[in-house]
Image: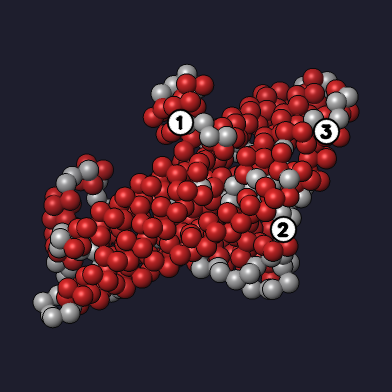
Amino acid sequence: MDSTEPAERERPPALAPADEAMLARAQTLREITDAALRDVAQLYPADDPGSVLRDALFIQGLAERLVDQAVVVERERGASWTDIGSAASSSRQAAHERWNTTVGAWVLMERRRTGIGNGPADPATHAQYLDEWYADLVGERQAVSALLPSLHDEAARTEANSRRAEAKQLHERAEELRKEIDAAYTAAMEATGTDAAEEKRAVWAAKHLASAEVYKRLAAIEEPIAVEHRRRATAQRKVAQDIVRDHAQQTLPADDGTRERVYAAYHDLTPQERSGSTHAVTTLLAERLNGPTPDSIRRHLAPVIEAYRQKERIGACSDPHTAVTTAFTLIRDHSRVSSDTGTYWYSQSRTLLSGYLMAAALSDGDLDTVHAWVSRPDDRRPVELLRTGPVPQWADECEQILNSPHKIRVNVLLIIQSVLREIQPRSTTQKEGSK
């Protein structure tokens, strides 16, 4: 990839996470205010039916974004899910289920304004921009800047960005440990019944314990999702204990094409058949597949079910936040970009993938649909779909990427293609391509 593109080190230093969240919230409030004032005196021609409603729905979308940002601000301020549930007249559990993904996406974005959105990248410039807007409205000067303590505190900004850097390193280490765990598992299984078995299992368990320590530290520095990090740490310690007790699950990575065959057969099951027990589903698949043993099928069943559920998630991406969050998660977990220019390419690929996911949901498509669009970037069908969706401006953002210089477009599409190859067994796409 081209090393001349913007790199992470060139980005302006961010504010403390709570101030970044407040600044993003202020930007949305400005957009709501501007849209409302514009609509007050808007002329709506008689030959443009539905335009009044479209403008109202646009403001509603901004208001929903504002609510999500308010939850992020509250979490950054230390509010518990019980506090948030109380403010929303709901239970703690309901609040967590409604907004936990929102908070998770914020953390994935390094707890700073990034991704799809508006406003200057430099926080000082952004705050001044909003200060001037507010002063023109009501006469009060520096109203927004006054709400951002770290804007005037270099030490606080330095500390916040040091924690961001540490979090990034920890997430990279967690990814490395996932690969090391797979390798340690394979070594332990190959050593079964030999003198080296106990030693190999000890190494395997130690990798899980190391992963637990990573998540424990992440819980301390990524406070908004500390509960999730602690849960992962507990799960990793439990797996290590099970390995030592010889009760660990036996699940090998796919390397012989069996998983693709299991996925294809699982896809063809009826919803009632898929709802059966693991034993019942395994038995059904063994009857329909010629070759893999029930034990082999069982080893691949859990990741196959996860891949199938991933495919079903596409339908939920008609919701803008779900589309953005899904794209962030997929790029984070499955992209292999690791150069200094990664942040730029992540941002571009996340934006385009978010749009493709929403367009697929709007057209009742699936991951095969997304894959087809990525393979044919001149196909403007997704852009046309986005113009009719809940956030028409996404069409312009995606079109800008698709019309960008060749080297940029190709690199962005390559990232998305690599993600799709990782998460989607190719059997379904091949099957449709052969028709």
Badge 1 amino acid: Trp
Badge 2 amino acid: Arg
Residue depicted at 20% across the width and 62% down the height: 243
Q: Is residue 430 visible?
A: no
Q: Is residue 168 above or below residue 120?
A: below
Q: Is residue 319 above or below residue 344?
A: above
Q: Earlier in the sequence, mark 1 or mark 3?
A: 1
C-alpha distance separating marks 2 and 3: 24 Å
Q: Which x, y percent locates residue 335?
A: 51, 64
Q: Is residue 298 left or right of residue 217?
A: left
Which of 75/431 is in front?
Answer: 75
Q: Is residue 404 left or right of residue 324?
A: right
- Crowdedness near tag 1: few (<14), some (14–19) or many (≥20) residues, C-alpha within 10 Å: many
Residue with the mark numbered 3: 142
Q: Which x, y percent locates residue 301?
A: 24, 57
Residue with the mark numbered 2: 11
Badge 3 amino acid: Gln
Q: Which mark is residue 81?
A: 1
Q: Earlier in the sequence, mark 1 or mark 2?
A: 2
Which of 350/99 is in front?
Answer: 99
C-alpha distance separating marks 1 and 2: 32 Å
Q: Which x, y percent locates residue 377?
A: 61, 62
Residue depicted at 46% across the width and 52% down the height: 218
Between disc 2 and disc 3, the foreground one is: 3
